[in-house]
Image (cartoon, coloured by chain):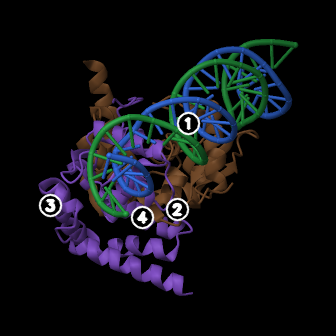
Chain colours: A purple, B brown, C green, D blue
Amino acid sequence: MDIERRSGCPINLTMEVLGDRWSLIVIRDIMFGNHRHFRDLLTHSVEGIASNVLAARLKRLVSLGLLARQDDPSHSQKGIYSLTEPTIQLLPVLAMIGAWGCRYLPVSEELGIRARLLEDGGAPMWERFMDELRLIHIEDPVGGAYGRHVSSVLVDLTAAYQQMQDRASDA
Amino acid sequence: MDIERRSGCPINLTMEVLGDRWSLIVIRDIMFGNHRHFRDLLTHSVEGIASNVLAARLKRLVSLGLLARQDDPSHSQKGIYSLTEPTIQLLPVLAMIGAWGCRYLPVSEELGIRARLLEDGGAPMWERFMDELRLIHIEDPVGGAYGRHVSSVLVDLTAAYQQMQDRASDA
DNA sequence: ACAACCAGTTGCTTATTGCAATCAGATATA
DNA sequence: TATATCTGATTGCAATAAGCAACTGGTTGT
């Protein structure tokens, strides 16, 4: 799969690769939700992605080298989708996008908490998280998919998210 | 104009607002090229935006508060499009997107130089540029559109861009 | 008066998205 | 062994968005 290459401008090329409604959402769910299987991504999608769109995005992102797919040893049909170095390096961009969205868009409390924590953590937290992502996605993608490693940042973010969600369902 | 609001996630909302092939391109041309009129944006577009798409994007971005439009006193039909505080605050995001694109996508020399300068300048340069953008777009949009103020960052970026372009046309 | 310029609009074709239903193979359960 | 469920998708169809070229109604400078 090739990109269109309307121009060689870095912003344009990035938008050609990621400038649609779903690609970054998929990357976000893999990165922050550790959703590593097709079904996982499909059924836990907050935004409700359709299966054909998800299939198309995964195929495209893999062919661009932004995701990697390996067979799941526990099931001959299952594939495990993992981040690659380029997508891991996207973390600071996602953190800044999240921070910007929190400031200027009608973000909900539960879903904004992770972005705020990530913003407060700053570059040191990002570096730590990126190292943990390398372990979970590149060094041991299978173990990473099945939670056999602990990412302290992911644990913190997920705990805060759960806490906000619980509080919201109480009310 | 309203956004869809599939979810309250900051990344999702940002993609709903800016996640298409043209919105960020238009903002980039206004920010870095100081293209402030419809015709300016249309004819100097490196990627070749169509007039109807440009019109739709400008209308949408204005209605979302991401751009402002004021009448040009020199011509009763002309409008001047200006950045607003939210779009000025997008600069760090654009800088990081540009840096990421330079590392992982087939960026051309001429068009990548601005992103590299902006990355090297870091947060201090971004703050300086954002202050200059506030003058050119918010405090005095008309004067800013007609180059009656000098943005040192914009001058540096444009000079480097021109130099690369000249070098490329020599070869 | 007239040519050039202004910001868009219109009509048309093609490409992309979204939705619901469906598919075949693999696995777990009775 | 039969069957139900789970797997990652695919198909067909309708709606939306993008891309292209021609055009509109008005303004400005000569």
Badges 2 and 4, same chain: no
In front: mark 4 or mark 1? 4
Residue at label 3? A135
Q: Is residue B113 above or below residue C5?
A: below
Q: Chain of mark 1?
A: B
In front: mark 2 or mark 4? 4
Give the residue displayed 49% in from the left and 53% down from the top. Answer: B15
Q: Amino acid at mark 3?
A: Leu
Residues at marks 1 and 2, CA–CA distance in whole angstroms: 20 Å
Visible residue check, residue B127: no
Kindly state the secondary structure of the residue where label 1 is placed: helix
Q: Amino acid at mark 2?
A: Pro
Q: Position of residue B117 (x, y in %)?
A: 28, 48
**Which sits in the foreground, C26 or A113?**
C26
Kindly state the secondary structure of the residue where label 3 is placed: helix
Q: Is residue A37 above or below residue D21?
A: below
Residue at label 1? B41
Residues at marks 3 and 2, CA–CA distance in whole angstroms: 36 Å
Q: Is residue A104 above or below residue A18?
A: below
Check the picture and name the quadrant holding the N terminus of chain A: top left
Residues at marks 2 and 4, CA–CA distance in whole angstroms: 13 Å
Check the picture and name the quadrant holding the C terminus of chain A: bottom right
Residue at label 2? B86
Residues at marks 1 and 3, CA–CA distance in whole angstroms: 45 Å
Q: Chain of mark 4?
A: A
Residue at label 4? A98
**Which sits in the foreground, A12 or D12?**
D12
Q: Amino acid at mark 1?
A: Leu
